[in-house]
Image (spheres, helix red, strand yellow):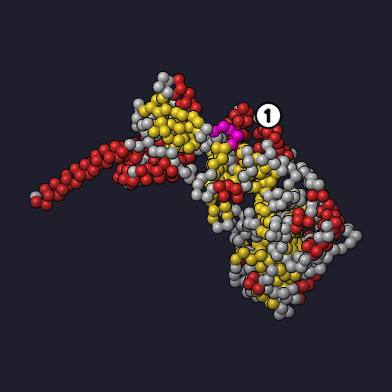
Amino acid sequence: MKSSTTTGFASAVLLVLLCGSTVAFSLNGNYKTIIDTLAWTGDLSEIYSIIERNQIANTTIHLRSVTVFAPHNEAFLKITKQDSDDEYLPCYHITNVPMKLEQLGKSVFSELDGNPPIWITKKSPEEIYVNQAKVVYNLANYEHNNTFGKPQVLHVIDQVLQPLRMKKNSPQNVYNPNAWEFMENAEYLDLDSYHTNTFLQRVQNLDKKSVFSNQGGHTFFIPVDEVANYPKVKPEKIDVKVIDAHIVPDNVLFLGPTNEEEQFKTLAFTDMLKVFTSLSKAVEGDKTKYYVSSDTVVGDDVHPTGAVVAEIVKANIPVRNGVVHLISRPLMIVDNNVKQFIESYKDREDSVLHRFYEEIMNSGGDFLEKLTAMPNVTLFAPSNAAFNDQSIQPYLLNRTYIRSLLDLHIVNRRLSIDDIVAESIDKRFQVQTEVPRKDLFFNVVTSGKNRTLTLEGGGVNATVVQANLAATNGIIHIIDHVLGIPSSTVDRKLATDPTLNETNYLGQVSSLNDQLGDVQKRFTYFVPRDFAWKRLAIDNPSAYKKLFMPEYSNIARQILERHLIIADKVFTMDDLRKEANNNYNLSVHLPTVRDVSMYIKIKDSVEGYSIEWRNEWIHVHRSDVRCTNGIIHVIDKVLIDESDVEVNGAIATKSITALVLVLAQYLVFYYFN
């Protein structure tokens, strides 16, 4: 029955939202006890009901001082109801000390049998988590004495707290176990039919019980015996250091409050071996899956560098000394080559590389054999989302084309993120792929502790979304675009390429770029990279300065038009080379917008292509950068003569002078008449 012994008027005002599913109600103006607040607030009816049905919880909240962590009704809609809810949930949401948010420590003891802890994570004064659940800050810190004068506190939370439960009809009870006792008694616990016997056996054999029994608050990643569609690991590979890599000391990491990709030192982080761990999530089909990654940044003869990823198959299990996450495989162990790594996604349809595996097999499958034959390889593997991009679907129908593009994703050496960062100091690092004359170009952006790696291949920019995945013969980086399949127009490519900023700027201020988004036209654009403009600034500072003045934008446009061809087709560097070789003077006519009778020569060498213009050879830094409406060749020099700026500059100066004289004459006439 709902109590009627209340004072004041209505407690909580329930608001109807026009969109979304966020709960919005208020406890302002409420003067009821905690139990009456739960009873009369419609959006807290679920937690009230289970407390009312549980004699211990109901008695406790009526007679004693308590803090209640109350999930709103929407939180209950997100969980699957179990027969044991009434037994476990009420007391696990209550602690027998009244505490406001600022009084909460690292944990509080619940009223459930054995008093298992509820773990507190404070990310800021207003962002506080209780295990996995977030405190709804504006619905927290509600205080009131019960009818016996005992002080009580209510905090509303956005998820239902889930304690560790026993199996139904278990012959043995386990009260508030630590991580070791958890593993030792796993057969009696409700773990969704997962077993941890193999890992337990290795911990026992290697006498590592103590690291799972340590007091305090830690995080334990415990591999289960077997998960469908995940390769099994040989138990003997689980050694002392591997076991240590499954423990994050002095940090209780529930999934909700833990930042994605934030690295934490594991127990295996020592002077000679350095292993971090981090958490991530991915949307696969209609599900969100969570993963843990071990990243060995300093390895040894037995433990190679690189990351190993495991799926978290059962998360957020609170224990006496922290939290346990059950994972699909042991961390740190590298026992698959690159081919086997890709094949492990074969039957996991919504997994991040399933589409990549399918495209490999659709194009003949020999790509996997090529990976196996390479002793040291780096693979940039496009994700499912990359292959689901609607703009590239027509290209995927051409199996021969896709097979050739796969080689653009391979580098014949090991390249970790740290290797690329080291190579990128004071320069833009590039490396040859398995496609002749096709390099990958890297760019590293650092913000605080976060590093973002982007790369370009075949005219397509991609970002590494998961890095340093280790294999016995190489490293895999997962990227968010398929390299070599154009998805940007020429103008968008200029706007997004960090090495083409100067040309893009001049094209914008001179309005030349306005036409480069036209998908009905075909552009071939010899684009000076930023290095070329810096070279001009040194060789001819006066011309450089004028070109970047707004009043000289028309001159800048004319110079850029010398670099641009508009035709009914695009011209690759190989097209131009072949045409030049067929001509008696070994030169090729370029009908640019500015100079319709422009001729250049083409040279092909191990360093790549070069073009000769006005008796000077200019290196083509990147050739055949494909766009949806054209092609870009990035060059190392601006095609400019001194007379371009001097003559046009003189004309511009004379025009301005003439205008000033006309205005002066007008003013004199107006003033004296």
Q: Which residue occupies 44% across, 41% down? A: 529
- Residue 72 counted in the magenta span: no
**Residue identified by numbered label 1:** 364
Pointer 1: residues within 10 angstroms few (<14), some, or many (20+)? Answer: few
Is residue 100 in sight in this rendering?
A: no
The amino acid pointed to by label 1 is: Gly
Quadrant of the snapshot with the N terminus: bottom right
- 619 left or right of 181 in image: left
In the rendered view, tell whether residue 163 sits above or below residue 373. Answer: below
Residue sitting nearer the eye, 571 or 351: 571
Residues rendered magenta in the picture: 433-437
How many numbered discs?
A: 1
Our reading of the magenta stretch's main secondary structure is loop
Residue shown at 75%/76% (left/top)? 64
Is residue 434 on the magenta stretch? Answer: yes
Residue 425 x %, y %: 52, 50
Residue 167: percent from the left, percent from the top? 85, 57
Residue located at (60% from left, 30% from top): 404
Comparing 286 with 328, the one in front is 328
Placement of 406 over or under 499, stated as above or below? above
Per the image, label 1 sits on a secondary structure element best described as loop
